[in-house]
Amino acid sequence: MQLFAPEPNKNLLPFDGVVHYHGSIIEPSDSMHFFSQLRDQIEWKQDEVIMFGKRIVTARKTAWYGDRNFPYTYSRITRHALPWTPILLEIKALVEKISGETFNACLLNLYHNGNEGMAWHSDDEVELKKHAAIASLSLGAERKFAFKHKINQTTVPLILENGSLLVMKGSTQTHWLHRLPPTTKVQDARINLTFRTMF
C-alpha cells in the first residue's frame, strides 16, 4: 500500500527541504528491460565501507558513472566514475526530462533482496554540488524508504514503487537523513539509480 499517492508538485517534507515523488514513470515492461540490461551490463562491485576502523565488504553491489572520471568518496572509500553506457544515457535523458534537472553522474546500487538495505545517511559529500537536486529511480522490488529530520527526529515514510522517481532538492541533504530499511518480506532484487551533480 502506497503511503503517499504520487503528486509530483507536492513537497513530501513538512519543512527544511523539498522532496517530490513522481510515482512510476516507466511502464512495467520497460522497467523489466532496464533492470535486466543494467543487471547484466553494469560493472558492479561489492561496496566497501569503513566501520569502527574495520573495512567491511557489503553484500550490496554498487557502480559509479559520469561525464568524466569524477572521484567520489563516501564511507571513506574513493571511486572514480566510469564512462556512461548507452542504457544509462537513455535512462538519464528520461529522468532529466521528467524532473526538469540536469545531472553529470550516477551512483547505482544493486540490492539482491530485502536483507540488503542502507542505514540512515545524507548525500552531502564535499564532491557534490551543494543543494543540487538528486534524482532516485527505482527498478525492481518495491521497498520502504524514509526520511528523518536531523534535529527533531520527524520521520516521513513512503514506498518506492517499481519504475518510480523520487527527487530531493534544496536543503534536504543538510537537514534530513534517509534510509532503505532491510526487510525479510522482500525476496526480489532492486536496482536504484541516483543521479547527481558533481563539481
Image (cartoon, rainbow, N blue to C red):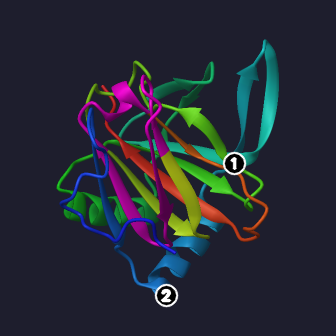
Q: Is residue 93 above or below residue 64?
A: below
Residue 30's quadrant in the figure?
bottom left
For label 2, the residue is 29
Is residue 133 something one can see in this rendering? no
Q: If the image is split into quadrants, where does the C terminus sit?
A: top left
Range covered by the magenta-colored residues:
147-176
Residue 40 seen by the camera: yes
Is residue 4 highlighted in magenta?
no
Q: Identify the residue at the far top of this view.
A: 53
Q: Is residue 168 magenta?
A: yes
Q: Nearer the viewer, residue 157 or 194?
A: 157
Residue lying at 42% horizontally and 27% vertically, measured from the top left: 152
Q: Residues within 10 Å of mark 1 (few under 14, many from 20)?
A: some
Would you name the residue on which mark 1 appears? 61
Measured as percent of width and height from the top left, residue 16 is found at 27, 32
Q: Along the horizontal axis of the image, is 191 left or right of 151?
A: right
| Image quadrant where residue 150 sits | top left
**Who is closer to the viewer here, 167 or 19?**
19
Disc 1 marks a residue whose amino acid type is: Lys
Q: Amino acid at mark 2?
A: Ser
Q: Position of residue 103 (x, y in %)?
A: 29, 45
Disc on the earlier residue, 1 or 2 = 2
Displayed quadrant of residue 70? top left
